[in-house]
Amino acid sequence: MIPAQEMIRNQTVGGQSVGASSSTFSVAKAWMRALEATSELGEHSLNTLPSVIEHHAGRRADAVALISSTSRLSYRRLSQLSNRYARWALAEGVGVGDVVCLLMHNSPEYLAIWLGVTRIGGVVALLNTNLVGASLAHCITTAMPKHTIVEAALLPAFRSAEEHLLVKSALWVFGEARTQNRIDTEITRYSGARLRKSERRPVTLSHKALLIYTSGTTGLPKAANVSHHRIMTWSCWFAGMLDVQSSDRMYDCLPLYHSVGGIVAVGAMLVSGGSVIVREKFSATRFWSDVVESEATLFQYIGELCRYLVNAPQCGAEQQHKLRLCCGNGMRRDVWERFKQRFQIPHILEFYAATEGNFSLFNVEGAPGAIGRVPPFLTHRFPAALIRVDPTSGEPARDPRGYFMRVGVNEIGEAIGRVGVDSNGIIGRFEGYTSARETEKKILRDVFAAGDVWFRTGDLMRMDAKGFYYFVDRIGDTFRWKGENVATSEVEEALATCEGVVEAAVYGVRVPGCEGRAGMAALVVNGAFELANLRRHVRTKLPEYACPVFLRLCPGMEVTETFKQKKRRLIEDGYDPDLIADELYFDDRGLGMYVRLDVPLLARIEEGQMEL
């Protein structure tokens, strides 16, 4: 037995052996599987994901790799289809490092395209299908592509971006369209047989494979570099953590252009010979019947999906599924137990990671609300720390010697990960963005010692005495009011437990004559909601300074494609009843109740006549 395995077996959490947490899911074995699965990845290995699929095509040719609502691709057919795209890329002069942009909805063909292009050394930029105009043009320009592949249904979005483009590339259309450059018919000219030696290029794990864009909640999206090594590390690590078998089926309704839906969920299955159920998008009304009919055994989630499901009406199929485990990130404590119990989920594996990030946290133990931990036997391999941040500037604070300061147990600090590489290229790997300027913004130097380098996550967390991390907020989301720091996630969690509240977004707004920002909550509510009950509820859950001063009742919430709330527009709107059609309320402390906010009341607030 290797030392790491021995150390895992000896670890305890809260006095209980981590290996004894469940008869069906052993925490100790999960860590051992993940370590073993990634132990042989080497910087110069040729064992990329396309080559692994080719291997499965030879050994398990007829096994199903990808399933959509309209088609299925066996490993043989997936390999053949990706080979056609590889030969197309070769014929079109795509060289090692050349970029091909891809703008398509979720489908098995989507994966076949980037697997084929990256097989011969090309880099595929995975474009967000929700973007249009200048934002989409920014992403394409950032990538500097030689070719751009666009699904016919998304041509209007691409056309809206053309006038803003600063680069030109050859346009190829996938699907029915009036164009000569139709790629799905063009590739039928090429063979799907294994690439000949003369067609192969020495693409190693160190080569760049993808550009994956940040969600752009705080600005224009940035293109993160993703190497073949990163793809294989994610795929193998999660395959080990989830104990993926060839009989497993992963239900994936997350966008394929993001790292979780497009790499983690897909890669973990494909390296293991399992199947991926690819859905174009999430549907709360169809979810459970679809999971049951597709015989899914695994589900990759984003926390907000789980909240939608627990708030949805009961469905006859919701406990008839074959799910043995759900894996994802962002599930709040108030949703966790309800989701697990109502839908009879055997195990929830929450994790923390970022596309460009250089460390991850895993809540293998299933502790509700925790985003994960780094076990003591792995701290040398995944070095992470929480550092003090100036509440006003959002910048790390330094001690008299000029070094950063770690926070104590249960204190809030920014999470950072040490940058470096071990023999397997795993420790602190940070590949940055296409922009050197944006890359440098994420780097901290001389943090705890002269010459050390760390990656900034921009995420505020706290760690408890058992080593479990809890997400608090993004830097910039936390605001200061009445001399205190208010974490929006803490307020949102309290609001979410109030009867009648379906969804909550919390942010700070400027009030003339007041220091800091007053708390405001945008709420989506149902028929059980009562203003008086909400006011009583928040005052039992939160300190007075954190209770929302303003309320906005919205019919729905604008979110990103990964269901992160878009707060920028809400912040810009503020609380002006002349500009906002939604119902607005103000916490009148004199009356002890929320009152309707109209123009005369707004004037009194801004003239300083109301107590805040």
Image (cartoon, rainbow, N blue to C red):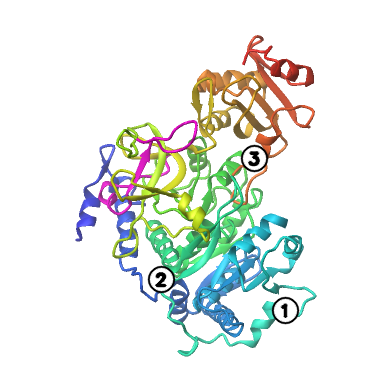
The kind of residue tagged 2 is Leu
- Tell me where residue 2 sits by quadrant: bottom left
Q: From the viewer's perspective, is residue 585 above or below residue 16?
A: above
Q: Which mark is residue 568?
A: 3
Closer to the chain start, of discs 2 and 3, is 2
CA distance separating discs 2 and 3: 38 Å
Mark 3, mark 1: which one is toward the viewer?
Answer: 3
Q: How many other residues sit within 10 Å of disc 3, few (<14), some (14-19) or many (≥20)?
A: few
- Whether 385 is among the magenta residues is yes
Residue 450 image point, x, y percent: 29, 47
Quadrant position of the C terminus in the picture? top right
Closer to the chain start, of discs 3 and 1, is 1
Closer to the chain start, of discs 1 and 2, is 1
Q: From the viewer's perspective, is residue 197 above or below residue 514?
A: below
The residue labelled by disc 2 is 205
Q: Which residues are magenta?
A: 369-398
The residue labelled by disc 1 is 181
Q: Is residue 7 left or right of residue 441?
A: left
Q: How many other residues sit within 10 Å of disc 1, few (<14), some (14-19) or many (≥20)?
A: some
Q: Which mark is residue 108?
A: none
Residue 351 image point, x, y percent: 43, 48
Which residue: 43% across, 73% down? Answer: 48
Q: Secondary structure at mark 1?
A: loop
Residue 158 image point, x, y percent: 72, 63
Q: Secondary structure at mark 3?
A: helix
Residue at the extreme front: 401
- Whether 307 is among the magenta residues is no
Q: Secondary structure at mark 2?
A: loop
Q: Nearer the viewer, residue 336 or 412?
A: 412
